[in-house]
Image: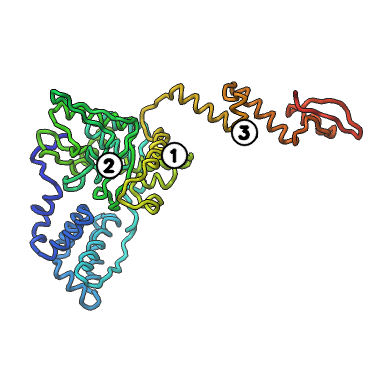
Amino acid sequence: MVFKKGHSDFRKNAVEGGYARDLMKDETIKLWYENLKRKSDLTAGVYLRGLNYYCKRMDTDPGRILMDAGADNGDKLQRDFMKFVSIMEKEGKKGAYISRYKKVIHSWTRFNAVKFHLIANIENENINENVQDERVPTNEELGKMLRKAGLRERVSISLMAFSGLRPQVLGNNEGRDGLRLKDIPEIEISTNSEGMQTVRATKDILLINVRFNLSKKRFRYHTFVCEEGVRYLVEYLEDRIRSKEALTDESPILQYDQESKREHEVLGTHYLTKAIREVVRSTGFEWRPYVFRAYFATGMDIAESKGVVSHSWRQHWMGHIGDIESKYSTNKKLPDDILERMRESYSKASRFLETEEKGISEKQHNEEINAVKIMMLKLAGYTEDEISNQHMLEMDVSEVVKKFDDKRARALNNGNSQKVVSFKEVEKYIEQGWEYVRDFPGNKAIVKLPS
């Protein structure tokens, strides 16, 4: 999807030159908006437009809202807001959408030090009915969308689906900042003597550093991207190099097309999610862009259930505050040994994320077989020295199984090779692999372990 020069920033237009322009002439409203923006420019824009919409629908203004909130225990504002809720419900608006305006009113009155709390009940206000039945794509469906996407959208989708990144991390709402090449330090850009650039990934699984100002919770965290995602990223960067772009550490991972961008301009959230929606629709699906982050979460759920990743690590990779943040000071890089253990764990979990089936190497196959052999032999009671000295890992699996059975059987019989059992039990023991020796007085028999 190409965004031409006419695509001036959506969020900026909505505030400075659009439907909330008149409100911004008021100094108090401007201060309120800028205060919200310091924490989240997305929330600031939504709340400003929400206040503007409420005022127009209820034929009021921000100043009158404050007066109504402070007079007669806020009775008039309570009744007005209940009328607003009824209007919205009759127009078919969902509870979660209507409840946004309750938050707007509370934010505006609280900022102006007016004690007021809306008591209006809103049906299903805590339920996002638009997404409650939304399922996560399968690997095959994600693969279909990735194949349909252009180079840039393939990267944006894969960084959400394979790394768990929010759209706002890739590019914030104003397009002023977002993920940059410096945030993926294991991508190496080289320039030869003729000024030609090349790009390569120095590792199969790449570390991604999410700066605190890109994080929703305002702390630095780390995640990774798998081999499939790395390939998409390298292909996209190579294409940009062919388009005569000179890549630097400050180059954004996602940006506008060469003919329509300012230098190093980051592709804003609105445009990157719009482009993703077009890819999704073109493949016959109706998912929201955020479903790709849910895809990552689902893959990590599976990996966690199989013991591949820990809960605290998957929390950290998704930018949630958890055990990692309580153990290590926020906004500081984790120790290298922790990051490498995380990388190894993520690598194992990536099979639940990637859309391309890959065979395993002979070395990996042998390592997995040996791991099973060691587990069986240790369960049977063999020590590491016995396993090593007797070269048990060089045995066939069938030989290891026999070793396991023999050792366990001896352990069950306290080391005795023979046992006295009743005649009624002889058949059972023979079925278990024991051998009949001879009769024993008292309607009993002697059985022994096979030699």
Residue furthest to the right in view is 441
Query: Camera-side residue: 198 or 148?
Result: 198
Under circle 3, the secondary element is loop
Under circle 2, the secondary element is loop
Would you say residue 135 is visible in this rendering?
Answer: no
Residue 141 numbered tag: none
Badge 2 or badge 3: first in the primary sequence: 2
Q: Can you identify the residue that label 2 sits on? A: 289
Q: Can you identify the residue that label 1 sits on? A: 303
User: What's the residue type where badge 1 is placed?
Assistant: Ala
Quadrant position of residue 102? bottom left
- Mark closer to the observer (3, 1): 3
Q: Give the position of the N terminus as an image quadrant.
A: top left
Residue found 78% across the figure and 32% down from its top: 416
Density class for disc 3 (Cα within 10 Å; few <14, some 14-19, many ≥20) is: few
Residue 232 locus on image (x, y percent) = 27, 30
Residue 247 horizontal side relative to residue 398, left or right: left
User: What's the residue type where badge 2 is placed?
Assistant: Pro
Residue 131 locus on image (x, y percent) = 33, 47
Badge 3 or badge 1: first in the primary sequence: 1
Q: Can you identify the residue that label 3 sits on? A: 383
Residue 295 locus on image (x, y percent) = 36, 40
Residue found 46% across the figure and 23% down from its top: 363
